[in-house]
Every structure is written in C-alpha cells, then in structure tokens.
Amino acid sequence: MPDSILSFMSRFNTIIIGAGPIGIETASALQKAGLKTCIVEAGPIGATIASQFPPDTRFFSSPDRLAIAGIAIPTRGQEKPTREEYLAYLRSVVATHELDVRTFHEVQRIERAEDCHRVEMHMRSGQLTTLEATNIVIATGGTGKVRTLDIPGEQLPHASHDLGDPHQYHGRRVLVVGGRNSACEAALRCWRAGAEVHLSYRGSDLHERVKYWIRPELAALIEEGHVHAHFNTNLVEITPGTAMLQCIDTNTSIELVVDDILLLIGYEHDSALLRNVGVTILPGQGRPEYNEETMQTNVPGVYVAGTATAGTQERFQVFIENCHVHAHRIAAAITGSSPPTDPGERQLEEN
C-alpha cells in the first residue's frame, strides 16, 4: 500500500486520549460535527471504572446525570447504575455512534510535527504504532495513579490498592487502610464475604462524607465488634504475615496478624502526559492550565476534558455529571462555532 494512503488512514482531525465517559462524549460531538476522530485508550473502554470499581459498585449519581451523547441509560427499576450496567452502556454508546475506539493502546509520547501532533503508542501485543492528528484532547481522568504510603513492605504481593472481587477474601484476615468511601465500602463488603476485617484510619472516626447507605451500617458493625476499627493509627510497616500500626496519640505500636492488606487511600492525577506535550501544570494546584471557554491548554491544538481538568481532588467537585459541557466547548472551538455559555439541562435526542 502506498505511503500516502497509509498516512491518510492514520491521520485524524482529532485524537482523544482516554475512552471514559467524557472522552466518548467528546468523540461523539466531534464526529457529529463531521470531524474525523479517534479515541485511544491504554486499557478497555471505561478503564478507570473497570479497574478501580469493585464488582456491583453502584454510582452515586442518577442515570440522567451520567448519560452521555444523547443516549439514555436504561437501568433495572430506574435505580442508579451499577459498574457493570454503566460499562455496558458505554459500549453501547460507542457501538451506536460507530466511534473509532482503539483500546489497549498506551500512549508513550506525543510529538509536535510541522502541521500535526504525532501520538506514539504501544499496543497490548507489544507493537509500536503511531497516529497523527491536528488536535489532541487529553481526557485521562483524575485518578491515574494510586497514592502510596512509601513504607517498608508496601510492594509485597498481599498488599493491594484495589479491592477486586470481595469473594476472594472469604475466611481471610484483612486489613483495610483508609476511612473514606472506598475503604469503608471495602470493609463492609469483605465482612459480608466472610472475612475477619480490621480497619486502620488516621482519623478519630469514619469520614463524615462517607456515602449515607454505607456509613451507618459500618459504624454499627464496628460498635458491635464485628469489624475491628483502629482509629488514630497509621500503617508504618508490612511484613509477609503482619501489619504494624502506630498510634498517633500515644506513639505506641499495634501488630496485627493479617493475610491481606487493602491500601485504599485514594488516587492522584497523573500529569505525565500533559507535561510531555508541554501543558503548564499550575503550581500548588496540580491541574493543567486551560481556557474554560474552549478547553484549550496553553499548547495550541491540545485540549483537556473531564476530571483531568481538576488535577488531584481532595474533595471531588469535578466529576462526570458536570463535565458534559466540555465536549461541546471543544467541538465548538475546533469547528469555529459559538461555544455554549451554559451547560443547562442535558436533553436526550428525539427519535
């Protein structure tokens, strides 16, 4: 095949990095505007949801607020969608709109050529491939890296930063580290699966913003002695069979015999790709510099969308349901049309 044809086939108006909800919604808006668009994703569609959410996790937001690209989310009993329902929904949006999504394409670097950006990626097979685009949209989310404690033993195989399927913890002694939503839900689900559960948290009680359907039940289990809570403690060392806690108030130590340790202390924004392409990361905020009207960064032709705009969030204020407008701002900026001034209510497409 002639090189000119190969170049045309791998050249796009826009490449979107990240096949999460907002990346998919942005691709739909650009494709609707007649622009040749491709999404590349290091994992599967909805990778963050697929990898970081345990099975059957239910979203906090309602279906209408999570819906994208003009397609409603049909859920059983009109409940908030589960992880599995939402992943199936994202697949259906991609299929319905016939979006070009290339999963398991991990971006290694982005280079600026004379008239385009070159995106170099490793495929899951190990092959190296390159695509070109006039514009780049980075929609990689805000939880690309796990937080670490940097303590001895943190890399041991029985220490994990993800819950996974709670079934695996039946009959095992599990230490959950953390006191917010992920940790509290993990403690509850491990106990339900038949584990002996210990919870270590540096606070004096479960965090006040733990989901309202989780906090009271876990608090009751702690009060009744079913879940062993160690408040005001820090995990300071992990060995193959034990976990060492240090009491913050008394500076004394507690040694726990455990089989598994779940370090559910949150995630951080991974700004490496943004820095690679030259985007300014604002000091002290960890978020990229961008124009809120167009979503374009300080690098011409490079845009940012979704929760990647917020950097690492200590208290989540930017999430799926208030990022829908990003897709339309980017589409307007690239096509030269008037940007939306107010996200307003999201209307589903009429049949």
Image (cartoon, rainbow, N blue to C red):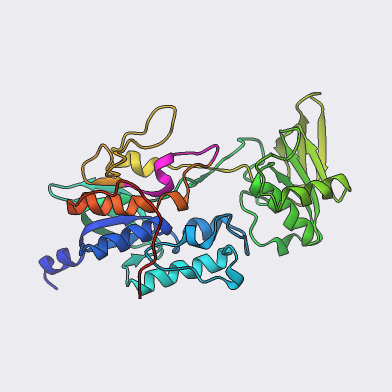
Residue at 79 percent across and 50 percent down: it is: 197
Quadrant of res 297: top left
User: Residue at the spot x=46%, y=42% of the render?
Assistant: 269
Number of numbered discs visible in the structure rendering: 0
Direction from residue 2 to residue 82 in the image, left or right? right
Q: Is residue 205 rendered to the left or right of residue 336?
A: right
Identified at 69% across, 49% down, the residue is 212
Residue 147, image x, y percentages: 56, 40
Q: Which residues are magenta?
A: 304-315
Could you say where residue 214 lies in the image, as x and y percent from the top left?
71, 52
Judge by depth and name the residue closer to the eye, 204 or 344. 344
Drawn side of residue 265 relative to residue 102, left or right: right
Q: Quadrant of residue 61?
A: bottom right
Query: Residue 341: where, in percent of width, then height?
Result: 30, 46
The quarter holding residue 84 reads bottom right
Can residue 151 be seen here? Answer: yes
Closer-to-camera residue (55/173): 55
Q: Is 65 in the magenta?
A: no
Give above or below for 209 relative to 247: below
Q: Does residue 122 appear in this view?
A: no
Q: Is residue 99 above or below residue 258?
A: below
Q: Nearer the viewer, residue 116 or 20?
A: 20
Considering the image in quadrants, where does the N terminus appear?
bottom left
Q: Is residue 306 magenta?
A: yes
Left or right of 49 in this view: 32 = left
